[in-house]
Image (tube, rainbow, N blue to C red):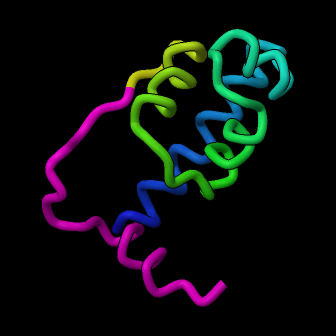
Amino acid sequence: MYAARHARYRHKVPGKRKAKRWTQATAALHSGVHRTVISQIENGLYSGSLKVLTLYLNALELKLSVQSAGIPQLDELEALFNDD
């Protein structure tokens, strides 16, 4: 389930940055987050603090929210068992 939700934000975050016409280096200047960390976030490799993630999301005018896990949707289950 995490992978399916993670995949959704992986596309939204770089899309928002590109909509602002920012490179990762420009986003780093605006957020105070190192460019390599931005790359990790956008590629789903980041495992650091929520504080740093929030700094980057705030610069993009995005908000981090927490939701109850609930019952997974069919597309979320399919993503869990996808062998790709």
Q: Position of residue 72 (x, y in %)?
A: 24, 67
Residue 74 is inside the magenta segment: yes
Q: Position of residue 54 (x, y in %)?
A: 45, 26
Residue 22 appears in which quarter of the rendering? top right
Q: Is residue 40 above or below residue 57?
A: below
Q: Is residue 78 above or below residue 68?
A: below
Residue range of the region highlighted in magenta in the rendering: 64-84
Residue 14 is inside the magenta segment: no
Residue occupying image coordinates x 50% and y 16%: 58
Residue occupying image coordinates x 62% and y 44%: 41
- Depth check, front residue: 9 or 46: 46
Q: Is residue 67 above or below residue 23?
A: below
Q: Main secondary structure of the magenta part?
A: loop
Residue occupying image coordinates x 78% and y 24%: 18
Q: Position of residue 48 (x, y in %)?
A: 49, 47
Residue occupying image coordinates x 43% and y 41%: 49
